[in-house]
Image (cartoon, helix red, strand yellow):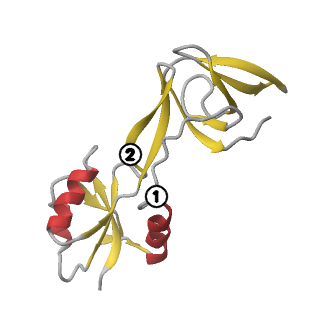
């Protein structure tokens, strides 16, 4: 019987593994997402990244395609197993992943004044801020709430962030 399983891939070889498995007639799912980054005063998109780096969802029937054929595929390290048997992923989980990620539009819209953003790196990683208009060629201004006070913080060039809410002024 055909089921969904999780295959662990070798480092950064999710796409290669997916291609080789699909060539063997195995259905694959590699959910991806995209981000934006501030670089040199401009908002740039980053190439879509795997949602689960190092893993790939595969659908096959172990009676038709043996697990050793999957494990022996280029780019695949192993199948996630418990008690010596490959772990089955419920269909409803895959359905939710497909609905939420597969075919979702990749947004590279630049934030506008008043948008809430979540900072993903640097000294302010994990903090939510309000985006203000860019200041010059290499900076942007964010409003951060620090110690119960809003502070205008200039942000240097390669900040990673994602927009959490549109046009919500604080």
| Residue at 71% from the left image edge and 41% from the top image edge | 167
* Quarter of the rendering containing residue 62: bottom left
Return the residue found at the far bottom. 1
Q: In this view of the protein, which residue sits in the foreground, 25 or 9?
A: 25
Could you tell which of marks 1 and 2 lies nearer the N-terminus?
2
Q: Position of residue 127 (x, y in %)?
A: 67, 33
Frontmost of labels 1 and 2 is 1
The quarter of the picture where the N terminus appears is: bottom left
Which circle marks residue 47 in the picture? none
Which circle marks residue 104 in the picture? 1
Does residue 77 sit above or below 154 in this rendering? Answer: below
116 horizontally vs 1: left or right: right
Does residue 117 sit above or below 103 in this rendering? Answer: above
Q: Position of residue 163 (x, y in %)?
A: 60, 41
Q: Position of residue 70 (x, y in %)?
A: 19, 66
Which circle marks residue 48 in the picture? 2
Dot 1, crowdedness within 10 Å: few (<14), some or many (≥20)?
few
Q: In this view of the protein, which residue sits in the foreground, 85 or 57?
A: 57
| Secondary structure of the residue carrying numbered label 2 | strand
Q: Is the C-beta separation of discs 1 and 2 under 8 Å?
A: no
């Amino acid at each position: 019987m055909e089921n969904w399983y999780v295959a662990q891939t070798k480092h950064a070889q999710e796409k290669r593994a997916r291609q080789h498995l699909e060539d063997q007639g195995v259905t694959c799912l590699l959910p991806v997402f995209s981000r934006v980054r501030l670089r040199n005063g401009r908002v740039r998109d980053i190439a879509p990244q795997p949602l689960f780096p190092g893993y790939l969802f595969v659908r096959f029937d172990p009676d038709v395609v043996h697990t050793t054929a999957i494990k022996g595929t280029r780019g695949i390290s192993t199948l996630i197993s418990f008690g010596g048997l490959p772990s089955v992923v419920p269909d409803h989980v895959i359905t939710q992943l497909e609905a939420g990620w597969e075919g979702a539009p990749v947004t590279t819209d630049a934030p506008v004044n008043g948008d809430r953003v979540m900072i993903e790196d640097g000294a302010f990683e994990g903090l939510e801020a309000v985006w203000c208009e860019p200041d010059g060629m290499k900076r942007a201004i964010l409003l951060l709430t620090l110690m119960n006070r809003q502070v205008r913080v200039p942000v240097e060039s390669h900040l990673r962030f994602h927009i959490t809410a549109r046009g919500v002024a604080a």
